[in-house]
Image: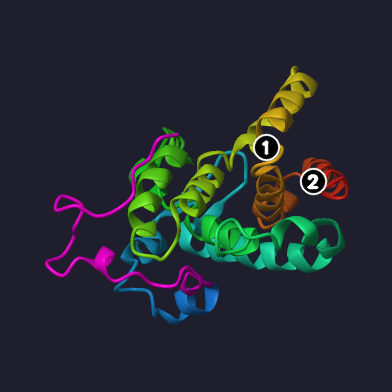
Amino acid sequence: MDRAFGCGPKDCRFDSCRAHMKKNIARLNKTNIVSGRLFDLVPELYELKDVIENSADGWHDQESVFDHTLSVMNALEKAFLNFHGYIKGTINKEVTTNTRKILLKVATVLHDIGKKETIVKDQNGFTICEGHEKISVQKAKKILNLFDVSREEAEFILNIIENHHIFHRLLRTDNQNFQQEFVTLKNKFSGTIWTELILLSYADTINSQLKRVDAKEFRRRINFYKQEIEKL
C-alpha cells in the first residue's frame, strides 16, 4: 500500500488546518471520546451516533456504529487482561515510538468510521456496509494526519483497518476453503498484524449480537479466536 502522509493545501479542512497542530495519538481513547473532548478534533467519530445498523445475520440489532465502537474498545481492553500472558511480548513492542497496543487501540477507534458513507438498507430493511473498510482507510488516513505518528505507525494502523474483516469472512459456515484460506492469511500477516487482527476480530465478535441470535455459532467463533490467541 502506497499512502502519502502530510498536509497540503487541498487537505486542509479549516483555515487553521488541524493537521498543522499534531496531537499525541494516545488522546484517541475511550475516556476522551465519551467525554466529548474530541468532538472538535475528530467530529467524524461523533457522526457515527446517527449511523444505525440492523444486519440480517443478527450481528447488529438497531445499534449505532458509535456505540458498537465503544463496545469493541471495552472488549479489547478485557482481552488485553485475559490473554496478557500470550500477547504481552508482541503488543508491548514499539513500532516507532508507540507500542503496538496503542496502535491497535487507535485502529479499533477508527475501524468502522467509513460506515456512514457506505451504509444502505435492503428491501427488508436490513443494513449492509459493503466496502466500508476501504472508506474507513481513506477517512482514517486524514484523521491520522492530525496526530503525531510516524509513517510506519500510520501504515500499521491503516493495515489493520483495511483487513479487520478477514476473519469474519473466513469463518463463514459456508466457507468450503477454510483451511487453505487460513494458511494463506497466516502466511500473509504473520510478522506484521496477525496478532492485532485476531484480537480485534475477537473483540468485535464478543460484543456482537451473535451470542443472542445464534449461540452455537458464537461459541464456534469465540473458541477459534481463543485457540489462536493461545498459539501466539
Q: Is residue 30 left or right of residue 179?
A: left
Question: For residue 227, what is the image quadrant?
Answer: top right
Is 173 situated above or below 39?
Answer: above
User: Of helix, strand and loop, which one carries label 2?
Assistant: helix
User: What residue is drawn where x is 72% and y is 55%?
Assistant: 206
Residue 172: in sight, yes or no?
no
Front-most of residues 183 and 201? 183
- Residue 138's spot in the image, x, y percent? 36, 44
- Which three-letter amino acid code belongs to the residue tagged 1? Phe
Q: Is residue 146 left or right of residue 131?
A: left
Query: Are circles 2 and 1 on residues that touch, CB within 8 Å?
Result: yes
User: What residue is drawn where x is 74% and y is 55%?
Assistant: 90
Is 64 situated above or below 38?
Answer: above
Q: Which residue is mark 1?
A: 167
| Magenta run includes residue 25 | yes
Q: Which mark, residue 225?
A: 2
User: Of helix, strand and loop, which one carries label 1?
Assistant: helix
Nearest to N terminus: mark 2 or mark 1: 1
Front-most of residues 43 and 184? 184
**Local crowd at mark 2 within 10 Å, few (<14), some, or many (≥20)?**
many
Q: Is residue 202 left or right of residue 55?
A: right
- Residue 68's spot in the image, x, y percent? 55, 59
Span highlighted in magenta in the image: 1-29
Is 175 situated above or below 134?
Answer: above
- Residue 122's spot in the image, x, y percent? 42, 34
The prevailing secondary structure element of the residues shown in magenta is loop
The CA span between labels 2 and 1 is 9 Å
User: What residue is drawn where x is 57% and y is 64%?
Assistant: 98
- Which three-letter amino acid code belongs to the residue tagged 2? Tyr
| Magenta run includes residue 226 | no
User: What residue is drawn where x is 56% and y is 39%?
Assistant: 163
* Count of picture labels: 2
